[in-house]
Amino acid sequence: MLAKVNSCALIGLEGVLVDVEVDTSRGMPSLTIVGLPDAAVKESSERVRAAIKNSGLVFPGKRITINLAPADIRKEGPAYDLPIAVGVLIASEQVWPQAVEDALFIGELSLDGSVRHVNGILPVAAVARQQGIPRIFVSAADAPEASLIDGLEVIPIEHVAQLAAHLQGLRQISPYVPDDDPASAPPPRYAANFAEIKGQEHVKRALEVAASGGHNVLMTGPPGAGKTLLARSMPSILPAMTIDEALEVTKIYSIVGLLPADTPLIRHRPFRAPHHTISHAGLVGGGHWPRPGEISLAHRGVLFLDELPEFSRRTLEVLRQPLEDHQVAIARATGTLTFPANFTFIAAMNPCPCGYYGDPLRECTCSPATVTRYQKRISGPLLDRIDIHVEVPRVDYDKLTDDRLGEPSAPIRARVEHAREVQRGRFADTPLSCNADMGPGEVRRMCRLDEAGRALVRAAMQQLRMSARAFHRILKLARTIADLAGSGDIETAHLAEAIQYRPRRKL
Ligand SMILES: Nc1ncnc2c1ncn2[C@@H]1O[C@H](COP(=O)(O)OP(=O)(O)O)[C@@H](O)[C@H]1O
Ligand SMILES: [Mg+2]
């Protein structure tokens, strides 16, 4: 008898329906899986056999052929255990085919028949919903994640025996009901707070502007000036994500298997700070079956690269394309795959190898040639993609020992939220979410200047020998500064602030 069960494969971030067909026929007892299965799928046969036997059910002593269709899509991982087991139960007439018609199955099995977590539940559930499949069977551990998709009945299963009893109509499993609205949870407690950072007011201001409009920042300064501390305080002023953004980010973490067990929905903007020894594939994504890298894990949040010149030149150059396109294209044998990578780039560096070039108190021991070589490690095109260049000088003793606290993160975050609100209104009819997302067309329409503003930019462009890209970046940045000030027009003061964030040294 032939049985057919719905399941799902993932290509990059997208799910594709997969038919799991199980056929039994007379002959030597055997089990064969066809349809491009990888090693983990092939091992399914052993897990399914043991799980069915250990659930008090019968594993048929027949020739069993399993086909995963369509055949040209890679099927990886153990997620097909559950649909294969259900197919075997139908093909051996222990479950009626009608019982599984309106459902999609996904889950890994243990030898004892219990059902385990698999990665990528959220995109799979999204596919079920899109394809009009009203019900999804997942492990009990994965039910909260699947329930993030509205209008889908989620059946949580602990064990194959329990599932069989449900499908046989003997004992019903109730659909999963989420405890509470995942969007209404309290804000997190942040590790760092801007109040604790002494001085550096202009850097804090730059980070506030960056958080408001999603602009990239490079901080340069001597060791111990607080660059790492400032960057790590950034999450405490980032604006909240919309539900759609949260779902986008959660999808990525779901596929990589990085969703925290207790929180099905990622509600806070990610902050990723990979070490400079990170591999190329680890940063941008890739591998045999391409997986999202750090730049995609930072999607809708912050990618922080500390000690920027320590990263290999090749690693840094691959950032250029995603910084421009907000997504990353990964080539593979069967075409390219894209992952979202719309992140705010924050970087920190010392001005030279010894760290004290330009410091008023401590002498730099590097030769001029060494300083130049060090700074050249960051290429002009990469620097050109950074909106805000800010120097972080050492803080003097008086400031550091001053007991008065600075402005805490909460009011700063409130201003950032307000500026984002203005941007949401501006971009309501577009797919953009913040000023940094604007392309040249939007810049032309939404960042108009008056006569004085045009004169100022013209002079700055000549003096600083700016590229067309730098020009657009200044206008976007000025737009954000105006939004923070609650101004509908970009005024000269807003432009002037934006221009002083350009790098001093020539690109
Ligand atoms: N402005 C500051 N206010 C308070 N503490 C500071 C400040 N700058 C540096 N520190 C202290 O010095 C430590 C080292 O700073 P860090 O951020 O690592 O410097 P950098 O990354 O610039 O080398 C911090 O962990 C913090 O304890
Ligand atoms: Mg540091």
Image: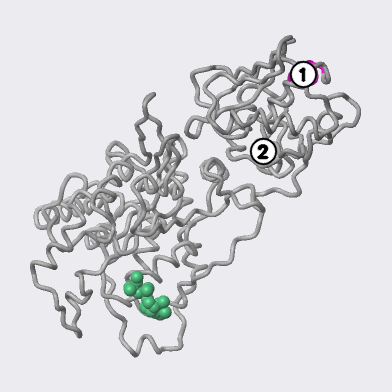
Q: Which residue is mark 2?
A: 146
As rendered, which of 398 and 262 lies closer to the eye?
262
Ligand 2 is found in which quarter of the picture? bottom left
Instruction: Tell me the CA gap for discs 1 and 2.
Output: 35 Å
Measuring from the top left, give residue 235's x and y in whole percent.
Answer: 48, 61
Residue drawn at x 14%, y 51% as measured from the top left: 466
| Secondary element at tag 1 | loop
Quadrant hosting residue 460: bottom left
Q: Is residue 157 left or right of residue 433?
A: right
Quadrant hosting residue 24: top right
Q: Amino acid at mark 1?
A: Gly
Q: Which residue is mark 1?
A: 61
Residue at the outermost right position: 170
Measuring from the top left, give residue 93's x and y in whole percent.
Answer: 82, 16
Q: Nearer the viewer, mark 1 or mark 2?
A: 1
User: Magenta stretch?
Assistant: 96-102
Quarter that holds the N terminus = top right
